[in-house]
Image (tube, grey):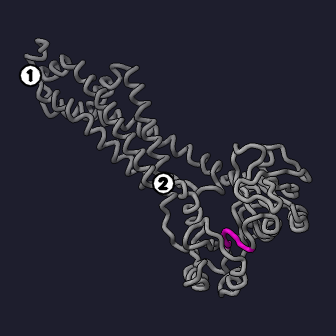
């Protein structure tokens, strides 16, 4: 620590260059923090430990299941309540901005009582209105929708029986998220599955997935196995998993998230190595006479080596800690925005920070190694002579 002031002064010898390099490092570790959170969220294990599970097709989550499974699932010991839903894929006026919209059972919101809040009068109106729809408060605010307003959605997948793509709904309820961190769930548009089943041209008596609330989360494994056994060796075999795992599988349709995140991080850090390596090489090259003076004053070769390496590690650590700290601040906001559509991004936690700090140390040592060796091998006479 007695040489810290010397290291600090050398680091800021060229302030503009250092600031731009720090910004590059900050950006790299901000991306690392975000992508690591994404990778972790999409690689959650399929541990059946939740009180809510999703029953979907074993082949693909895009493969529908027969509604006839409902009674059998309800009779499985340990099942408290069952609902169902189907992806609709419609849009309002224009394909963008996109929002999730589902055809759901009449008890669907009741299955998520701990997550959503809908006034009782509006819940009754939804139950009594054939073409009724309930929407999230954020979505209603975005489009200026009011209770009683009729809203058309244009079908992207399911046309009507008459060949039309226009589906008309009446807004009878506006729900809110009980948890402020899950405000993104208020971007959903929900309407009656029966209305969808009667009106669509292609699919009858089929649902996308079942939602199962358990009497006790401890029974999750047993209940999951019992449900999957109901359709074993049939043309509609099921896969029962936690809600978190189902959301991850739903989002993974866009690709292998872990592989994509890993590839991006590798590219970012490779570029960072080139950038910071050039910065450190240039910084040491400019200070050759100064390093020669230090050796003249009695600094040993290994001390000069350590000073340059410490400067390199400090440069990476400053930008890295700032970047990961910014990632910690951004993640809650992303969870609020994406809730209901993607798995919740976890905070970096001690594992993420340890990985990040290890990368900072490794990158700092790698980019500082060649300049530090050059400084250590420096001959005083040659350096002062400008050779």
Element under disc 1: loop
User: Disc 2 or 1, which lies upstream in sequence?
Assistant: 2
Q: Main secondary structure of the magenta part?
A: strand
In this orientation, does residue 89 appear? yes
Highlighted range, magenta: 205-211
Magenta segment includes 207: yes
Q: Position of residue 53 (x, y in %)?
A: 62, 72
Query: Looking at the image, which residue is at 80% across and 43% down?
Result: 143
Task: Tell me the tag on residue 197.
Answer: none
Element under disc 2: helix
Residue 321 found in image quarter: top left
Residue holding disc 1: 379
Residue 309 found in image quarter: top left
Query: Looking at the image, which residue is at 55% across and 43% down?
Result: 329
**Distance from Cα at disc 2 to Cα at disc 1:** 51 Å
Query: Looking at the image, which residue is at 31% across and 26% down?
Result: 279
Give above or below for 25 relative to 241: above
Residue holding disc 2: 257
Please state if 179 lies on the left or on the right of 227 as rendered. Answer: right
């Amino acid at each position: 620590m007695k040489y810290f002031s010397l290291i600090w002064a050398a680091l800021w010898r060229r302030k503009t260059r250092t600031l731009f390099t720090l910004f590059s490092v900050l950006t790299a570790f901000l991306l690392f923090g975000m992508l690591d959170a994404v990778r972790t969220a999409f690689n959650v294990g399929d541990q059946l430990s939740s009180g809510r599970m999703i029953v979907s097709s074993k082949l693909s989550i895009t493969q529908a299941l027969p509604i006839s499974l409902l009674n059998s699932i309800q009779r499985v010991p340990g099942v408290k309540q069952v609902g169902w839903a189907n992806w609709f894929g419609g849009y309002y006026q224009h394909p963008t901005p996109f929002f999730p919209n589902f055809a759901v059972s009449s008890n669907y919101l009741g299955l998520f009582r701990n997550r959503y809040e809908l006034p009782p009068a509006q819940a009754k109106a939804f139950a009594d209105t054939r073409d009724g729809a309930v929407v999230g408060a954020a979505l209603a605010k975005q489009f200026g929708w009011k209770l009683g307003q009729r809203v058309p959605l244009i079908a992207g997948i399911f046309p009507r029986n008459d060949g039309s793509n226009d589906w008309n709904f009446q807004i009878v309820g506006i729900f809110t998220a009980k948890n402020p961190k899950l405000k993104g769930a208020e971007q959903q548009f929900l309407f009656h599955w029966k209305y969808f089943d009667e009106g669509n041209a292609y699919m009858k008596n089929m649902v996308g997935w079942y939602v199962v609330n358990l009497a006790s989360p401890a029974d999750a494994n047993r209940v999951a196995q019992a449900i999957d056994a109901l359709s074993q060796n049939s043309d509609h075999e099921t896969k029962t998993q936690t809600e978190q795992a189902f959301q991850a599988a739903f989002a993974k349709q866009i690709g292998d998230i872990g592989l994509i995140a890993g590839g991006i991080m590798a590219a970012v850090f490779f570029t960072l190595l080139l950038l910071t390596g050039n910065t450190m090489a240039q910084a040491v090259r400019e200070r050759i006479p100064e390093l020669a003076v230090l050796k003249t004053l009695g600094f040993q070769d290994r001390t000069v080596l350590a000073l340059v390496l410490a400067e390199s590690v400090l440069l990476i650590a400053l930008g890295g800690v700032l970047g990961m700290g910014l990632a910690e601040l951004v993640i809650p906001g992303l969870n609020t925005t994406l809730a209901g559509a993607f798995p919740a991004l976890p905070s970096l936690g001690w594992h993420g920070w340890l990985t990040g700090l290890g990368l900072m140390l490794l990158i700092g040592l790698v980019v500082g190694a060649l300049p530090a060796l050059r400084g250590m091998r420096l001959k005083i006479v040659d350096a002062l002579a400008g050779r």
